[in-house]
Amino acid sequence: MVALTYPDIVLRRALNAVTRASLSQRRKTEVAWQLVWARHYWRLVARLLNMGFSLRAPELSWRGHYIVILNHRNVLDHLVAAKVFHEMGVEDPRWIVKEQMRKAPIVGTSLERAQFAFVSRTRNPQDIDRIRQMARIACVDHVSVALYPEGTRFNGKPKAGTRYSAVGEPKVGGFATLCEELPDYRVLVVCIDWGDLPDARTIWDGSAYLGREVRVSVWEQINPGRDGAQDFLTRVWNEMERRLTESLGRVLAMRVRTADVEGHGRV
């Protein structure tokens, strides 16, 4: 990252300074750099760990911009998202990110320059103001926006009283604000399926990803508006739960059949 990725953004910023690029173009430069290198790192990680990727998605009927919502399981979701955006033609999305990302080496400065919305996990009233500001900037720049409505990574262990076993409970605040501020945007749902991945949420859990295939399904929906945001998220998360649990059932059944065949072979 120090040898290649950082010098690349320095050169891009220098070019913007020489050409006196607009603030909009400077923001787009930051996001373009993030996406290009995220895809590079995805190819690197996938090759090193022998990982597969499959995408099930219809051709998008909407030619405008999207509010993209994704479920969140581990740190590699960011790299997977960059690949999905590229495949679906969703360029230059602006994200809602956690406040701690400001301090991320190299990346944090880029997120600030792109004017992403940094939010806390303490229900700070200013979080909504930051999301509104980001949405308005995205509208000016004619770009999409993205968020993980769960707010944090799901560790595969459902909390007591939750409705879900394969995803975390979605929070409506940020999504509802985006729906209100961007009424002409549609919603793009991205369901990321890691199968029976254990609680491997960081890049240091490499062995858990070895030989694994990540399966992604995408579909588009009409913007429900602020008033309909809660019911919309419930319906979408119920559908994610159904898809992920059915997929996990198929994976486990296949492993049982494979184990039976191998057992007979040894006999």
Image: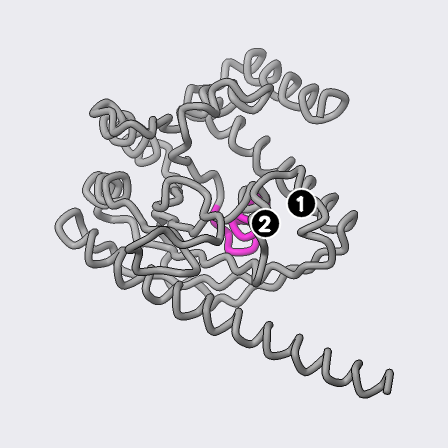
Question: Which residue appears at 43% of the width and 52% of the height?
Answer: 71
Residue 87 lies within the magenta run: yes
Residue 186 at x, y percent in the picture: 30, 53
Q: Which residue is mark 1?
A: 42
Q: How much space separates mark 2 and mark 1, taking CA atoms?
A: 8 Å
Amino acid carrying mark 1 in the image? Trp
Task: Using the image, tell me which numbered label, if any, was put on residue 200.
Answer: none
Left or right, residue 256 beside residue 64: right
Sooner in the amino-acid sequence: mark 2 or mark 1: 1
Amino acid carrying mark 2 in the image? Lys
Residue 48 at x, y percent in the picture: 79, 47
Q: Nearer the viewer, residue 239 or 263?
A: 263
Q: Around disc 2, counting alpha carbons within 10 Å, would you say few (fewer than 14), some (14 to 19), or many (20 or more)?
A: many
The segment highlighted magenta reads 79-90
Q: In the rendered image, which quarter is residue 127 located in?
A: top left
- The quarter in which the C terminus is drawn is bottom right
Q: Nearer the viewer, residue 25 or 112?
A: 112
Q: Around disc 1, counting alpha carbons within 10 Å, would you say few (fewer than 14), some (14 to 19), or many (20 or more)?
A: many
Left or right, residue 135 beside residue 50: left
Are the residues at dot 2 and dot 1 in contact (C-beta closer than 8 Å)? yes
Instruction: Check the image and name the residue furthest to the right.
Output: 266
Question: Which residue appears at 51% of the width and 32% of the height?
Answer: 31
- With respect to residue 219, does 47 lie above or below? above
Q: Nearer the viewer, residue 212 or 129?
A: 212
Task: Using the image, tell me which numbered label, if any, was put on residue 83.
Answer: 2
Left or right, residue 240 beside residue 197: left
